[in-house]
Each structure stands twice: as structure tokens, then as C-alpha cells.
Amino acid sequence: MNHLLERETRSSEDTFESLEMAETAITAGETEKGLQIYQSILETEPDNKIARERIRNLGARPAIKPPKLSRSRLAPIEKVKKLMMDADSGKSLEALNGLEELLPQFPRDSILYFLMGNIQKELGRVTASINSYEKSVELNPRYSETHLNLGRSYLSLRNFTQAQNSLEKAIELDRRNYLAFYNKGLLNEELGDIDGAIESYLRALRIEPNHPESNNNLGKIFLLRDEPKRASKLFERAISFDDKHTQALINQGDALSKLGMLDEAIANLSQALVLQPKNAEAADLLDKLQHQVA
């Protein structure tokens, strides 16, 4: 997220969501939409420093009233925002239907298709999500997040060629898209390219060291390569950033047991079972270790 957003910690939740939407629109090439969102923020918060600074950076003049920009291609901001709030509150199907109803009037709004793809993927409609992302890419090929999510959908269908093409495009457009590198690591593993997976996860962690999944997945590779000490450090990092990461707790238990630290291993596995009482992997490993210390 833009560092300007991170600095404004006192913004209300509603304003913060509007700022995020503005950044998403501008990143996607919808500058007019982003400007209108910033201007709408100034209507209610005339002293909002982020909105004013971003408008100046975009070469526009801050004003209380929104500028007279063409809205012929862009769906109404508040309507889209309301639909996405519905999706976040569990009303995904209603939100999807609402976005689809906007399409006949705004058929060239790439963000509509992008958001539809996100909801369709969440609902398990992976093929439909691919169609939506492809349409979004057709309308705006310069948005890295669309290529990322398209790659993720292809990956879930095990269409590895298309997944690789999409993820590489996402990286080409944004070299700091750590999730694109993370998903490329998943793809590398599926293809049996373990060295490539290591490099991809390392690239993700250089950009975002706090990403639990990249730490956990990289640690798992080192554990399988019989490097438990190196693996344990990565699992520890994953857990420090997400203490409810069940798989990282299980993997850490496994790594610690290989290092002879049985009490610590048992503690991690016990915590994993608190989070997921029916987790067979954790239960089996814990039972094995408890017999060793008995």
C-alpha cells in the first residue's frame, strides 16, 4: 500500500477504505476515478492531507467540489464501494450480482471485472473468475494485481503454462509484487523446480519479510532437504507474524524434534491441536514424540 496511507493512522475506517479504493483505481490506470474519490473525501474532510497531497501529485488542483470529469466509462464510486462492503460482510453473492448489474451501463470499467473476478474466485467459480480477469486485462493490461489474480486462478486449475505467463506479467509490471513471487514459488513447486521455488520465495521475502506463507513454504523445503536448523528459523518467523498459523506450528514441531528439542516440539504441536483439534498430522507427530519422552 502507498506509504501515504500508512502515515494517516487517524483516518476513519470509512475514509481509509476510500483512500485504498483511490489508490487501486490509480494503479489500475483509472486516474479520473481515483481523482473523484480523493475529491469526495475532501468534501467531508477538507483538511485530509493524504487526499490533497495525492491530488497535487496527480497534477490536479485540490477543491471541495469534484472536478468535472467524464464518467461515461466508470461505475459510480459509492455504489461499487457499497457492494464491496457487502462482500466483506459475507454477502458475496449479492455483491457479485450488483457488480454484474452495472456492466451493461459501464462495460469498459476494468475494475468492475477485476472485482467480479475476486468474488467469483472466493465463491469457487474459478473458470468464471478467469473470464472476468481476462476481460479486465483486455481493458487495462497495465494492472499487476489483475495478472496476479489471473495467475492464481490458472494455478488452482493446474493450468501451469497460463499461470506462469500471468505471474511473470504481474512481476514485469510491478517488481515489488511479493505475492506474485510467492505464487510463482507455488508454481515452481508444482513443476518440480525446487531451486526455482527457493529463489521465488526468497524474492518474496526480500520485498515483504513478514509474509508468513513464504517463510513457512521456504522452511518446508529446507526441512525436506534435511536442514532443520535453517527451517526452524523460518517457521519461527512465520509464527511470529501469525501465531495461529497451524501448518507452521506443525512444521516447527517437526523441525525442533529433528534438532532434539522435544519439549519445544511438543509445545508447538499442542498449540496446533488447540487451533485444529482434528488435525491428523499434528496428532500423529505429537503422539510419536510423547512416546519418545515417556
Image (spheres, rainbow, N blue to C red):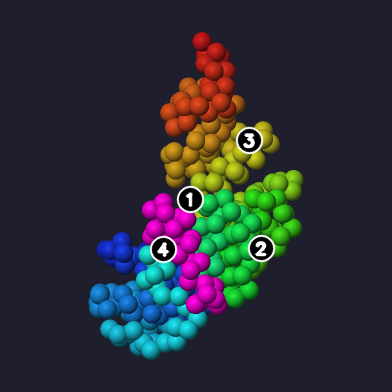
Position of the N terminus by quadrant = bottom left
Q: Amino acid at mark 3?
A: Leu
Q: Check disc 3: other Cα within 10 Å, few if <14, some if 14-19, many if 20+.
A: many
Going from the N terminus, do you reach mark 3 or mark 4 first? 4
State how far apart marks 2 and 4 are (Cα): 27 Å
State how far apart marks 2 and 1 are (Cα): 24 Å
> Is 119 in the magenta?
no
Q: Which residue is mark 2?
A: 166
Q: Is residue 259 visible?
A: no
Circle 2 SS class? helix
Q: Which residue is mark 1?
A: 210
Compared to residue 64, the image places residue 234 above or below, namely: above
Q: Name the one closer to the observer, 230 or 124.
A: 124
Q: Amino acid at mark 1?
A: Asn
Q: Which residue is mark 4?
A: 83
* Contact, mark 3 vs mark 1 (Cβ under 8 Å): no
